[in-house]
Image (spheres, rainbow, N blue to C red):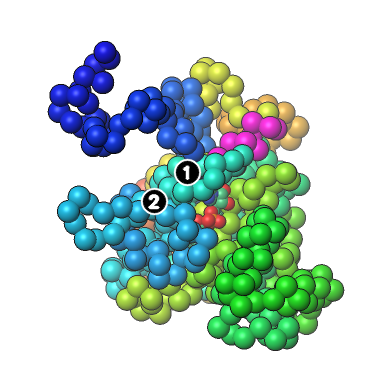
Amino acid sequence: MSRAAEAVMTDGRVRGGYPARRMSTKSHNKSFQAPKGTRDFYPEELLRRRYIAETWRAVSIRHGFEEIDGPTFEHADLYTVKSGEGILSELFSFRREGGDDLYALRPEFTPTLARMYAARARQLPSPTRWFCIPNFFRAENPQRGRLREFYQWNVDVIGGQEPSADVDVLECGIAALRSCGLIEINCPVHFNDRRYFEGFASEAGVPADKLAALLVLIDGYEKWSEERVSEYLKQHDLDQSTIKKIDESIRQMGPNRPGFEGLSHTINELEQRGIGSWSTVDPHIVRGLAYYTGTVFEVIAEGERAIAGGGRYDNLIELFGGPPTPACGFGMGDVVLSLVLEDRGLMPKGMGELMDAVECVMRSYSMRPDAFVFSNGDAAAEARVVPLMAELRRGVEAPGYQGRPWRPERYAVRPMHVRTTGKSTRNVGKLLKDAASSNARFAVILESGEHATVKDLTTGEEHKDTPIEKIARKIAG
Ligand code: HAM
């Protein structure tokens, strides 16, 4: 008899706390296997996971996001408020032995984030920029790209302006894909705005109270079986002809629908930051989660489930007792990203290369910002702030570089950690204090469309009239 079996016989329980009387021989053997849809991480697999997580962390920090985390389980009600049916049907929920409260293992982070923000809204900066890399649990049918436990990188801006905040999170997500060596044709960002979809739906005669159910269906339409679709239609009193009508209007109108101009602000800003070629308007993207209120997007790699998905959720913070606060963000999963990197030969191979990759990524950023960028209020200078920040964070690739994507030689100028102010004042003295309290090494004060003063905040040394194109090299050293 094995020692584990002996333990079951003598104290009535096995590791994990299952009562011995439930242990048939069959389930006993099963308990020696990892549960369906989970993964064991031996050293090599763990390094692979770490390569992805460290890349996410490096990119988040360079883009001025701060790391947070929350509990692994929450009151199940947190998810019934606004996550939507898809996630509710996949909850792993449980009660404490003898307790009444129903808990659920976290299936996603957004409700936790809204709860955490609402609890401290008054003390937190505006905007608040948070990221996290937790594990999540969904009772899905395991398949390629979908497991029951997975890691997901969340990047969110709470309290930011539209569309800049939407583009802030997109820029950060795209930077991670780029950092792994992916290019835009591998995994473009498809985006849309739910508000325009609501227009299609009301023209097709869908009552407002059916909209949430309809969005879930449109999101699931191509992934679900025929039976599931017809069962859902019956359950929500929707008919197939309405769905067809909406689908047709989407196809006919495409992105040229009058009213889609709202997205042109997002497109302009994506272009200003050098990531326009990564993004495409796709009226079919609506997303399955119930809390989205505006922009929605997915990063789609051909032949795979979405690598990432997100959008704007302007009502959620208020719903959890906070002040009305707009917010947007995305989640990127490790499972699909690993598959895409493996398929394209971009995942480090073997322990040596993995160690090298993790180390290179960890050394590629500093916790202290390299630069704190702002303008003196001159209109042309102000217009250069965002594009310059994007440029500094992206770095300059060495011409003709063909090596592994994580090696520092990839860059002629390394990607940098850059921040800016959340304040509306353009008083240079006040903003220099802001720069100092961010602990940045340099302040970059844009004074016109062409020139800036670069101030070393450690020595106080100033370089006036620095041409904008020379700033990156000056700071990178
Ligand atoms: P989501 O679309 O449910 O969004 O998940 C985002 C990403 O997480 C997916 O694109 C996928 O890569 C990964 N993912 C989801 N479920 C699984 C699974 N069962 N197995 C493996 N990977 C999975 C959300 O979770 C939102 N809370 C994201 C968000 C953050 N929206 C705003 N802020």
Identify the residue at horizontal 59%, vertical 26% (top origin): 348
| Residue at the spot of label 1 | 148
Residues packed near mark 1 inside 10 Å, few (<14), some (14 to 19) or many (20 plus): many
Identify the residue at horizontal 73%, vertical 45% (top origin): 302
Residue 410 rendering spot, x and y as whole percentages: 64, 33
Residue 378 rendering spot, x and y as whole percentages: 58, 74
Q: Is residue 469 visible?
A: no
* Residue 294 falls left or right of residue 322: right
| Residue at the spot of label 2 | 92
Up/down of 469 relative to 231, above or below: above
Question: Do tag 2 and tag 1 residues touch (Cβ < 8 Å)?
Answer: yes
The amino acid type, in three-letter code, at marker 2 is: Phe
Q: Is residue 225 visible?
A: yes
Residue 148 rendering spot, x and y as whole percentages: 47, 43
The amino acid type, in three-letter code, at marker 1 is: Arg
Q: Which residues are magenta?
A: 335-344
* Residue 392 falls left or right of residue 43: right
Q: Give SS at disc 2.
A: loop
Please tell me which residue lies in front, 427 or 102. Answer: 102
Please tell me which residue lies in front, 127 or 206. Answer: 206
Ligand 1 within 8 Å of disc 2? The answer is no
Ligand 1 within 8 Å of disc 1? The answer is yes
Q: Does residue 394 belong to the magenta stretch? A: no
